[in-house]
Image (cartoon, rainbow, N blue to C red):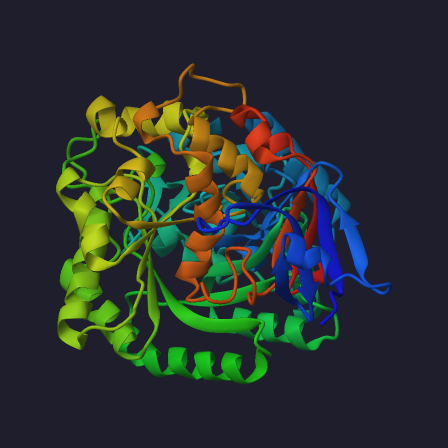
Amino acid sequence: MRADTIFTGGRIHTGDPAHPVTDALAVTAGRITALGAAAHALRDGRTETVDLAGGALLPSWGDGHVHPLIGGLGLRGVPVRDCTSLDEVVEAVRVWAEAHPEAEWITGDAFDPWLAEGGLFDAALIDAVVPDRPVLLRTMDHHTGWANSEALRRAGYTADTPQPAHGEIVRRADGSPLGTLREFGALNPVLALVPLPDLAEQVDALHATARALASAGVTWVQDAWVEPHQVDTWLAAVADGRDLAVRADLALLLEPDAWRERLPGLAADRERVEAAGRGQVTARAVKFFADGVLESGTAALLEPYSDCPHSHGAANWSGAELADAVTGVDALGFQPHIHAIGDRGVRIALDAIEAAARRNGPRARRPVIAHVQLVDPVDLPRFAELGVIANFEPLWAQPDPLMTELTLPRIGPERGARQYQIAALLRDGARVSFGSDWPVTRYEPLAGLATAVTRQTPGGLPEGGWLPQERIGLDQALAAYSAGVAHQAFEEDAWGVLRVGLRADLVQLAADPYAVPAGELAGVAVLGTWLGGRRTH
């Protein structure tokens, strides 16, 4: 046997406790064929050598919860993501609208919800620059929208419109809509009016996102919100002759309305993805939203919000109905993937998973609860007991303005001090995976690693870390992005560590992450990414 490629000249961190570090790795036909001295023995005149130049080679990373298509399309609208004030957002809308007179709708994605006091956005501000065309902007968490008056008019929202189920039309004192729409019950009627880009534009956006993820060292993603038309986009991207830069699993969205009637469609979508996904795209998960988000007061809590004592937030499903639905998709062999932020949202998600296991019997189901921001102490051990994977977005575990301006005032100091308990769940024996939820936050795992290890802002605050008892070690953080996501994907026998026989899914870094101060990890350059031995970056 000869090696197609040998990596040498730096430290190779395998992620395998039995053989954690080596100095050479050989790849043949897309798989790891040797490590160390045995790798050098496979070299011949046709072998390519990749010189790590004193840097490092690691298992590539996965993203256990991301929105490649939604994010890719959102960034093609008004560039509001980096705006630092309401005035900047409004000006960005004005400039984009003037530059695109042909656009029927004006949309933008991922602006910061703390730019307005209390997260309340007034339609009148956008009306002043675009009064005659509908405008809909979405905050970085995607759970709040800012609409102008024309968008509200087209959706039929007036002072007489009843509050929708699973959402809120925020109102002025006279009852008229303010322009702030919270949660999907209020957002979806407006989103349904926005014309979809054509399939070619959607496929281009998906390829662009896949390349960006690959440039960050990512080779596998869980698309955590996929509607039927988006299945078509993924399959078109696989079939269009361009190599897709990542592998993906699609979590098919299931909402509370008429969910039983939708089950056959989920199974049919899974089958057509299995038939046409060429082994690169699968559809084995189903996405649920148990609740909303803390910053807008829509996450479901066991006790009332500190700033709104009459509200416990909003559970999108009753406990009984979520248990039935999770049991239904589990019986079809799907992996439940449940968004749960508040402690009540987490509890009803755990209860639903427990009910499915009791009713359907034992199997390797590996259910996922994503975000896991606030967990009641009595529920922490249930993750390990039920085999639930806790999927965290580690960049959220810092005292940024979202936390200090919106979240902490809503939940108070006691609950605020038990958020994102990554270390606690690991100590309990729970399985943990990491993700980004991009476009909510950055997709680069190196930035997430820095936050998971330090619990600090990029500026290094606070000293010693925010809730420092929940800091984790670099070994644990790297594993959550590699072996942890591979376990979530049911692919631990294919990738996630560097071991002979496994797929050559690799990331090359300019520096050894173990030799870099933890707070500087986000600045380490990704020099190369390989998916099954094929270079994608």
Q: Which residue is painted at 45% across and 47% down in the image? A: 479
In the rendered image, residue 481, in percent from the top left (x then y), is placed at 48, 48
Left or right of 509 on screen, residue 335: left
**Residue 278: which quarter of the image?**
bottom right
Query: Vertically, is 328 above or below 484?
Result: below
Q: Which residue is painted at 29% across and 33% down in the image? A: 419
Residue 202 or 274: which is nearer the viewer?
274
Residue 172 or 216: which is nearer the viewer?
216
In the rendered image, residue 213, in percent from the top left (x then y), is placed at 62, 51
Left or right of 529 on screen, residue 494: left
In the rendered image, residue 116, in percent from the top left (x then y), is placed at 45, 28
In the rendered image, residue 514, in percent from the top left (x then y), is placed at 55, 32
Q: Which residue is painted at 30% across and 43% down in the image? A: 426
Q: Residue furthest right?
A: 45
Left or right of 343 on screen, residue 109: right
Q: Which residue is painted at 46% across and 17% down in the image? A: 461
